[in-house]
Amino acid sequence: MADVVADDGAFAEAVVFLRYFNELPDHRQSGKVIYPLDEVLLLCLLAVLAGAEAFTDIARFGEKKLGLLRRFRPFGDGTPSHDQLGDIFATLDAEAFQRCFVAWVAALTGAPAEVIAIDGKTVRRSYQKAGGKAPIHMVSAFAARQRLVLGQVKVAEKSNEISAIPKLLEMMAIEGAIVTIDAIGCQRDIAGKIIDKKADYVLALKGNQGRLREDVRVFVEEQKANSFENTTISRNETVDGDHGRIETRATTVIHDVEWLKVRHDWPGLQSIVVVDSTRDMAGEIEQETRLYITSSNLPAEQMGPIVRSHWAVENSLHWVMDMVFRDDECRIRTANAPANFTTLKHMAHNLFRKATTRDSLRLRRKVAAWDDNFLASLVTA
């Protein structure tokens, strides 16, 4: 890829994000490259920020906004067609693109994340009938407090999140963070990887860890029956009301788990977390108990918000990707293009989150479509 850092000063407005993609491999034959990769990336990101949802949209944006684009780069040969864009993104190394993304977002946040929620999402219309290719599944790491995507990896075909999560963890600097993962990530190897990177984990316990979960469940029920007299605990209770629903969450952290360490030899295990929730919806009562294991020894008043913050990845990322970026309707399907386009949308998501405005994300995207100065400010801030 051309050296984009050196010529930043040649233009009135420097594009900060491009320097983090300077080492992104460009496998096109150098003598046949008409459109430099830095120009392609800038075009695509600006177009997605302005509402583009397909390569045809990006190509039209390039035709209509050439003057805006030339505020940042020469675009001496104009902009690519939608077919050319599709070919470039299909052959672009998805893992290298994701590593560049991780480096960029690490600089963007400026401070380490406190709680990192890891969860997967299927891009539903990325399947291909020809050959029976399943839709792609992306696993993302989400900074719960900053509400920024920290990284993502595509789950390999005929595989699952269990193999993808360690790759994602390996990309990121997570020292000092608490990593929360739903039940599929409750695996010894994943827990060990988190500990090795000097972070802590909070992992949900469900049926996929049958013997471990059963031992924890029986122990918790016995201790509840004895009012936790025979173990060391901390407790905290919160009550929330919203949309006619009142939810009470009682968080209990059991700090005495030596017996569980001996029986299951789980890496770094320090505590069991029990969350008993009661939902009152117009007089209808629902009760649920959720179990977690953690390498942290934090008290319940701190652990409760950490457990709850995991769901930020659903409400503040997956929902936004569907409702604002129309992720489930995206029909990009060829080779690496779906994974790369998802990374591009995550970049746009992060830039909108960092924008200094009180508008909703949906409105920010609309404003970006008609206000060139606002759009330019997103990539030059």
Image (cartoon, rainbow, N blue to C red):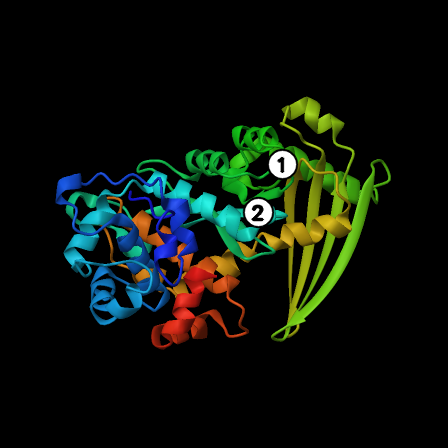
Give the residue at mark 2.
116
Residue 199: numbered disc? 1
Q: Is residue 141 left or right of residue 72?
A: right
Q: Residue at x 66, y 33 (%)?
A: 215
Q: Is residue 178 visible?
A: yes
Going from the N terminus, do you reach mark 1 or mark 2 first? Answer: 2
In contact (CB < 8 Å): disc 1 and disc 2: yes
Amino acid type of disc 1? Ala
Image location (x, y in percent) of residue 8: 38, 53
Image location (x, y in percent) of residue 156: 33, 37
Q: Residue at x 71, y 33 (%)?
A: 270
What is the spatial separation of the Cα atoms under label 1 and label 2, in whole angstroms?
10 Å
Question: Residue 45's quadrant in the figure?
Answer: bottom left
Q: Residue at x 42, y 37 (%)?
A: 164
Tag 2 secondary structure: strand
Tag 1 secondary structure: loop
Q: Is residue 140 visible?
A: no
Amino acid type of disc 2? Ile
In the foreground, 283 or 352: 352
In the foreground, 233 or 226: 233
Q: Residue at x 75, y 27 (%)?
A: 258
Classed neighbour count for the residue bearing mark 2: other residues with Cα under 10 Å, few (<14), some (14–19), many (≥20): many
Is residue 16 depicted above or below 185 in this figure? Answer: below
